[in-house]
Amino acid sequence: MSAGGWERARTIADAVLYEGYLLYPYRANSMKNVARFQWGVLGGDEPDSMSAQFICSGEISLCVRFLRLRHRQAQGDTPAWDEGVECELEFGPFDVTGLDETLPVRAEAVTGVVALRSERIGDQWQVSLTVRNLDAAQPMIGTHVIAEGDFVSLLEPPPEAESAVAACTQHRCFPVLAGKPGDHDLLLISPIILYDHPEVAEQSEGALFDATEIDEILTLRVMTMTDEEKAQARATDPRAAAIIDQCDAMTPEAMQGLHGTLREPHGLIPEVPNGVDWWDPFADNAVQPEQDAVLVNGVPVAKGSRVRLHPSRRADAQDLFFAGKTARVTAVHEDVDGQKHVAVVVEDDPAADLHDWYGRYLYFAPEEVEPIGAQP
C-alpha cells in the first residue's frame, strides 16, 4: 500500500472522526452545541455496536479509530466541557480464510471488542466485522475502521462477486474503497455513507472536518462569530482554535475558490449542438420524454398508451389508492442513472385534464404498469 493512499484515506477518516465534534466549531456555552456528538456513537444513549460485511481475500489488518470523552475543567469564564480524545488501535494481520477472532478494545476508560468472522460464498470470502462497546457509561464517538487487504467494491462489484456482495448486510455503517481510484487495498468502514475513493477537494486549504462538502458555508459561519464567541470556541479544543485562525486568515481569492466550482459531471451532461442554448429543451435530443418508449412485457409503452397501475415500490403512501386504476401515459422519462419512469394521469380522476395541462403527473416504474388495449 502506498503512503499516499493511506494519507488520502486518513484525511477522509479524520473528517468522519471529528465532524460531529468540531464542525462549526462548537462553543461550550451554546445550548445548540450540547449534543454535538452525532456520528458513529457506540454506547451512551445510542446502540452499543456497529457491524459491516464485505468481500476480501488474502490477509486483512484493521485500524479502529474513535474519540473518548474526557471531562475538561472550567478555565476562567469558559464552562466545563467534555472534550474528545483521539484513540487509534491496530489489529492484524489475519488470514481471511476461516477467520474467527474476538479482540479486546482498551483505551483508557473505554472497554470493547472487535469481532471478525469469515464465510465462504461461492468463490468469495465474506468477512463480518462488529465493533462493540462494553461500557455504556463511556461512549465511543465517531467510531470507524480503516482496513487493509484486497477488497471488492460493494457499490460496483465485478460480475463474479455480485452474488456475494448482494448477501452483505450493514448496521450503522457502510464500507467503501478508500485510497486512490483504481486501488482496492484500503477500505473505510464509516458511519457516514460515502462513495468509493472519496477525496478532499483541492480547493480546501485546511481541515474543517466536513469532507469539504460545505467549506464555504462553514467559513462564512465562523466569520459571523463575535470575538467573544471565537474566544469561547478556541478554549474548547486546539483544533477548534486552528479552524478559527484558518478562517480569519483566508484570502478573498481562497474564498472565491470555494464558491461555484464545476466538477467533472462524468458524462451526464449531454453535448449541446452549435447554435442551441444549453437551457433549450431541444439541447438534449438524446432524451425525448414525449416520444420515448419502454418495453413492458414485450409491449412498447409511450405517450398515449393506456395502462393499469400495480404500485409495488410504495414510493408514496397514496400509491395504495391507485392499485388497479387505469391511466393514460403522458411521457417516459429517464434519470441520470438510466432508470425509466412512466408518467401518467389516472383516467377516472376528475382533474385528469387539469393535471395534464400543468404537468402534475404520477410516476411509476415500468414493472408497476400493465399495458391494456391498443397501443399508439
Image: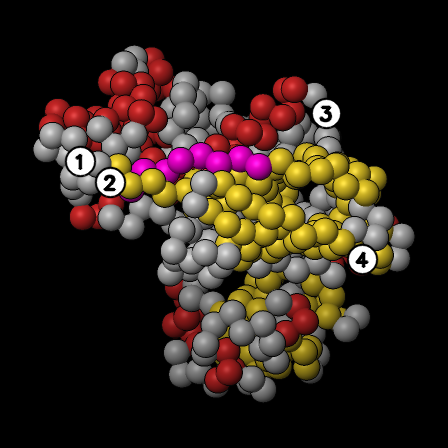
Residue at horizontal 44 percent and vertical 20 percent from the top = 203
Residue 201 is inside the magenta segment:
no
Q: State how far apart marks 2 and 3 are (Cα).
A: 39 Å
- Of badges 2 and 4, nearer the viewer stands 2
The mark tally for this picture is 4
Q: For the stretch drawn in magenta, what is the main secondary structure?
A: strand
Asked if 366 appears above or below 337 in the picture, the reply is below
Circle 4 residues within 10 Å: few <14, some 14–19, many ≥20: some
Q: Secondary structure at mark 3?
A: loop
Left or right side of 137 for 245? left
Q: Which residue is mark 3?
A: 1
Q: Which residues are magenta?
A: 82-89
Q: Quadrant of residue 152?
A: top right
Please state which amino acid type lies under the numbered disc 2.
Answer: Trp
Q: State how far apart marks 4 and 3 are (Cα).
A: 25 Å
Q: Which residue is mark 2?
A: 81
Q: Which residue is mark 4?
A: 119
Q: Which residue is mark 1?
A: 74
Q: Secondary structure at mark 4?
A: strand
Please state which amino acid type lies under the numbered disc 4.
Answer: Glu
- Of badges 1 and 3, nearer the viewer stands 1
The x, y position of residue 212, in whole percent, is 43, 31
Nearest the viewer among 264 and 48 is 48
